[in-house]
Image (cartoon, helix red, strand yellow):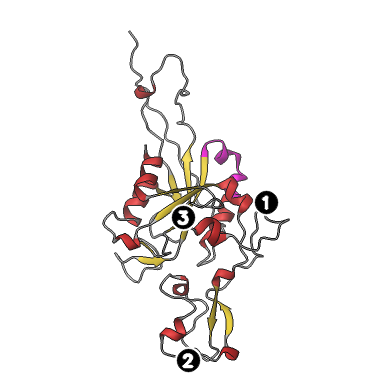
Amino acid sequence: MEEPVTTVFEELEPPDLPQDAVYTSCYCEENVYLLCQRFLSLPNITENWHIWTVFISNVDKKVALFSQKAARGDGLPVVWDYHVILLLQPKELLGCPPRDHPTIRQSDVPRIGARPWVYDFDTRLPVPCLWENYLTHTFPSDLLPEYTSSFRVISAQIYLSNFASDRSHMLVDVHPRDSDHNSGDCDRRKSEVNEKAALDKGREINEESRKLVYSAPTPPYEPLFGTAMREGRVKTNLMSHFVCMESLPWTFGELVTRSEISSRFLN
């Protein structure tokens, strides 16, 4: 009679966030793009981990995330139009026999080490953070439906090939005398603040005196275009192909709910 497997398998430790990782506030999609590039260039990561880019939003572009640095206080959410994180999923358990092993039942193999990790530049949680902890503390299950997140899961390779952004989504229409405008205020990119902000304050704006400014300082490098986009005429597909939370023919990746993404990466 076969003896059950009792070996304790080594846990796969996630790589640290590089100390020199590029970060620009309010440009989460670019921060994650560059981190994907870094991780994909390291064989010790690509040999052991699946690398995923995860876009977070909903059809109204109004999602509540907790444990974010931009929150106005402890225990308070930030309402974003969208957010982007990187997720590492182990390819195999270290020391674990392959799935087609002829004599060992997979049900006998301890699931030690099969834990995904999240890299979120804007969280107050540790980075990297265990996926289950990140879900619990960032997306509580009792949110109002209108603030509940959907998730678009895309492989890092597809993301790097097909992403294009000229950063035009960060341009806002303001009046030169609008003293309340602060180009470094990341709140301007939240869903409740938009190019109508000045009108919402009761100001009448002369069309000729309007100007477009970036709602947050741009990164110190040129806009990013994936390898498949550089020769084409696409200036940006960020909102239409990635942030969009509808299942449309041109969107990338797999669109899932909170419960679906939980079971996908935790089982």
Q: Name the residue type under label 1.
A: Ala
The residue that label 3 is drawn on is 246
Mark 1 vs mark 2: give the one in front. Answer: 2
Q: Residues under labels 2 and 3: Cα distance?
A: 35 Å
Give the residues drawn in magenta, as a range: 37-49
Residue 251, percent from left and from top: 54, 52
- Ranked by sequence position, the earlier of labels 2 and 3 is 2
Is residue 146 rendered to the left or right of residue 248?
Answer: left
- Ranked by sequence position, the earlier of labels 1 and 3 is 1
Is residue 236 rendered to the left or right of residue 113?
Answer: right
Q: Residue at x 60, y 55 (%)?
A: 163
Residue 33, percent from left and from top: 57, 55
Q: Name the residue type under label 3.
A: Glu
**Quadrant of the rendered image containing residue 31:** bottom right
Mark 1 vs mark 3: give the one in front. Answer: 3
Q: Name the quadrant of the C terminus.
A: top left
Residue 247, percent from left and from top: 48, 51
Q: Nearer the viewer, residue 249 or 172?
A: 249
- The disc at residue 53 is none
For label 3, the crowd category at 10 Å Cα-Cα, with few meaning under 14, some 14 to 19 and many 20 or more, is: some
The residue that label 1 is drawn on is 228
Query: Regarding mark 2 in the picture, which secondary structure is present there?
Result: loop
Q: Residues under labels 1 and 3: Cα distance?
A: 23 Å
Q: Residues under labels 1 and 2: Cα distance?
A: 44 Å
The residue that label 2 is drawn on is 204
Q: Name the quadrant of the N terminus.
A: top left
For label 1, the crowd category at 10 Å Cα-Cα, with few meaning under 14, some 14 to 19 and many 20 or more, is: some
Residue 106, percent from left and from top: 39, 23
Specify the farthest residue to the top. 1
For label 2, the crowd category at 10 Å Cα-Cα, with few meaning under 14, some 14 to 19 and many 20 or more, is: few
The dominant secondary structure in magenta is helix
